[in-house]
Image (cartoon, rainbow, N blue to C red):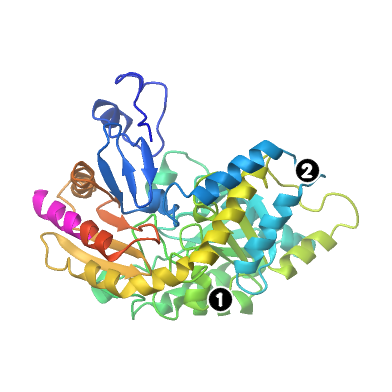
Amino acid sequence: MNEIRPSRPNNLDAFWMPFSDNKYFKGTPRLLARAQGMSYYTPDGKEILDGTAGLWCCNAGHGRREITEAIQKQAEVMDFAPTFQLGHPIAFEAAARVAEMTPEGLDRVFFVNSGSEAADTALKMALAYHRARGEAQRVRLVGRERGYHGVGFGGMSVGGIGPNRKQFGAQLPYVDHLPHTHLPARNAFSKGEPEHGAELADALENLVALHGDTIAAVMVEPVAGSTGVLVPPKGYLKRLRDICTKHGILLIFDEVITGFGRLGTNFGAERLGVTPDIMTMAKGLTNAAVPMGAVAASGAVYDTIVNGIPNGIEFFHGYTYSGHPLAAAAAIATLELHRAEDLPGRARAMEPGWQKAVHALRGLPGVIDLRDIGLIAGIELEPRAGKPGARAMEVFRWCFDHGLLVRVTGDIVALSPPLIVEDSHVDRIFGTLSDAIRAVPA
């Protein structure tokens, strides 16, 4: 395969990079030119082992021929068709394939183009549902501290990561937040679900006492990924489910990261034994080959909204590219790969060795916590005085320069490899990371 090289080494100005230190990067660029299997390759051909599945999304590995060919074939047949008052068969097929994978009852699928759009769509569904059932006073949305639900104004408002919010001033009104579940004093170095903290769900009862029957929905990630791999305490999500049911509140799971095998099951809801009313997904849906997201809703939510309007449009929401033919083709091919290769089963089989490798980092300089579930890991480093995030960023750069891609958020290194990972890759990931932690000064 021919290597792709930048046309000019200084031709970097036009692209305003997302979530990036643009000034630093454009002075010291780190570029990826191609990808195959478990690895990226730089423009000069250096291999970079992918410890993050791209950005939590290439669960089946890179360059999967089956997905590429499905996209090419569909592009030759029909490149685009609208889904406003029209349809095309492949979108319906893709929705049916998704509904086969989702937890029982979550079988109405609305397509979007990203996790951010999925979050905003799910929140709109919740508001429309309550209005359709005659409880229009339910306008309040509840998220969680340190939660991440994309960067649309809905998801950002319900999300609870400070830097993602404070630059933009006013956000949605009528939003509250539950406390996060990170309890390092009680749960440090947990393996899988921590023992302590289920009672934190009871904070929702306090919000109900304060706001009465005005709460429409609670949105949480089964495992909070972008904030640094926060695994829910045992019993926490079930307690949250019970409180929502008790008070007529919809429970929304953001499964953009935890979906499609990452936790050893199709979705985190299955692994953690709790079924929400609405569930968002993206990333692994198409193995990131074409942008696509989706929201799966219960039949009760769908029927209430659709039957609440006697004629005409029932849900005034959608995107030009909802159910895009190329994305639908990519999704079908990806889900077939998941089934044929049993990627969730691979994750389950790899989890014990993965967990052992994660916790072997205990005792390294500056490692103050380790946590894992499925094929996810969070390695928390002690921040430098007055320079939060600097230490982990240096670990990220050291790893890249030595052939490994990791992700950092604050002073937490997050790992989430493609589900085709093998023992030799695990050894390389943690060997390189261990060297990096030792090499980077405190």
Residue 14, horizontal then vertical, whole percent: 42, 21
Q: Amino acid at mark 2?
A: Phe
Asked whether 439 or 47 is in front, the reply is: 47
| Quadrant assignment, res 152 | top right
Q: Residue at x 60, y 72 (%)?
A: 103
Q: Dot 1 corresponds to which residue?
A: 241
Q: Please tell me whether mark 1 sits on a helix, a strand or a loop.
A: helix
Magenta-drawn stretch contains 336: no
Residue 11, horizontal then vertical, whole percent: 35, 19
What secondary structure is the magenta-colored segment mainly? helix
Q: Point out the tag, 1 or 2, that comes first from the N-terminus.
A: 2
Q: Magenta segment, which residues?
A: 430-441
Asked whether 407 or 160 is in front, the reply is: 407
- Which quarter of the rendered picture does the N terminus lie within? top left
Q: CB atoms at circles 1 and 2 under 8 Å apart?
A: no
Q: CA distance from mark 1 to mark 2?
A: 34 Å
Front tag of 1 and 2: 2
Q: Residue at x 68, y 58 (%)?
A: 95
Residue 92, horizontal then vertical, whole percent: 73, 55
Q: Is residue 371 visible?
A: yes
Give the answer, above or below, for where 99 lies relative to 412: below
Mark number, residue 84: 2
Report crowding for label 2: few under 14, some 14 to 19, many 20 or more residues within 10 A (C-alpha): few
Report crowding for label 1: few under 14, some 14 to 19, many 20 or more residues within 10 A (C-alpha): many
* Residue 418 falls left or right of residue 69: left
Magenta-drawn stretch contains 435: yes
Give the residue at the far right of this rendering: 311
* Residue 123 falls left or right of residue 373: right
Q: Amino acid at mark 1?
A: Arg
Q: Is residue 79 visible?
A: no
